Image: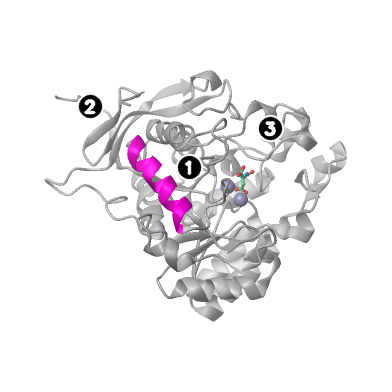
Amino acid sequence: RVLDATGLIALPGLVDLHTHLREPGREDAETVESGSRAAALGGYTAVCAMANTSPVADTAGVVEQVWRLGRDAGLVDVQPIGAVTVGLKGEHMAELGAMADSAANVRIFSDDGFCVADPKMMRRALEYVKAFDGVIAQHAEEPALTAGAQMHEGEFSSQLGLAGWPAVAEEAIIARDCLLTGHVGSRLHVCHVSTAGSVEILRWAKSKGWRVTAEVCPHHLLLTDERATTYDPVNKVNPPLRTDTDIEALRAGLAEGVIDVVATDHAPHSSEDKDCEWAAARPGMLGLQTALSIVVKTMVEPGLLDWDGVAERMSRRPARIAGLDGHGLDPAPGVPANLTLIDPAASWTVVPNELASLSRNTPYAQMTFPATVRATFLRGEATVLEGKAQK
Ligand code: NCD
Ligand code: ZN
Ligand code: ZN
């Protein structure tokens, strides 16, 4: 079979460090299979599945279940992330070693909110994963400063009378955990960085030689808190949409490499959880099928990144952070490749009902974006051809 790739760009298969697949527990919002399909259509060949499922992915049993479901779906490699602690109040450190040694081969462990509240526990977690070169992924949300917050704290939150989530709630905890990581000599990955101040702190931490990496989400590169004035909860997300100043700093930080990767934080929610008033709606938005196009619009078109830079930030570096062998590499001759073929000259309009996710919470409905994914190959097998999923 010959595929005419004239005018297309070949990238190593994209790797997402931050995907919520909702299985087990909320299969009405997403399953491993439906999320895998969205990922393949978005050009991904591997996704890291976040641990906040029900039950939480804090045992070898649950991470192996997610890993098997991913293998059976066969559309992308699903690499489970484990939760750091167990218990209603995070009383116990989870068996991180058992998750690492399981068939799921877990290397990234997500702070479920308890380490952020307790620096002693964060220090222990960093020490524990150091033994097997694991990574702690932290969500950069200081609990006391974000309690009850509904959106970014700024001009629009005052105007709307909604409780604000200040930039300092993110920055204070990033600074603390960079310091702890440097002290322990372990690895930290900062999820969904959203403020200009966070970029400055990360630049400083990296200048010290500490092993800190960071991700930015497409929505934080494109959308601002002004979206909240529509009161449409599709714009509600953690951390919240920020300001134009933050967008500029995040784009510059990603171009410079202070922010290592783009991660989607694909967060599907059922209409029951999203189509309600702002205060009651769950935070989070879909991301897998729009990520590449938004990176092209916000980074490639303005000349901040070239296509090799896209490969670096959406494939090679995330693969390295997650320890995903065989991903993020340009295919060697004779080796079945993980790759995606992009049409840079095409554009498309987002129609929520046409997305592969079981949920519809995209903030990009009816928006037109550059670049389409024409084909995706997982170890040489087409998972997407002519923009259609093959399973
Ligand atoms: C995420 C979710 O829905 O699970 N929501 C979000 O707004 N990002 C949780 C998270 O990553 O913080
Ligand atoms: Zn988060
Ligand atoms: Zn998330």
Q: Specify the amino acid type for callout 2.
A: Thr
**Rendered-image quadrant of the N terminus:** top left
Mark 3 or 2: the one toward you: 3
Task: Identify the residue position indicated by label 3 in the image.
Answer: 273
In the figure, residue 110 lies in which quadrant? bottom right
Tell me the quarter of the picture where residue 39 sits.
top left
Viewed as shown, does residue 14 lie left or right of 284? Answer: left
Which residue corresponds to the image point at 61% horizontal and 68% vertical from the top-left? 92
Which of marks 3 and 1 precedes in the sequence? Answer: 3
Q: Which stretch appears magenta?
A: 60-73
Q: How far across and down, in percent of the image, does residue 68 sit? A: 37, 45
Which secondary structure lies at badge 3?
helix
Label 1 secondary element: helix
Residue holding disc 1: 299
In the structure shown, which secondary structural element does the residue marked by tag 2 occupy?
Answer: loop
Residue visible at 41% across and 36% down in the picture: 36
Q: Position of residue 81 (x, y in %)?
A: 48, 54
Residue marked by disc 2: 6
Amino acid type at circle 3 is Asp
| Residue 77 visible | no
Looking at the picture, does residue 113 appear above or below residue 182? above
Residue 40: % across, % down: 37, 34
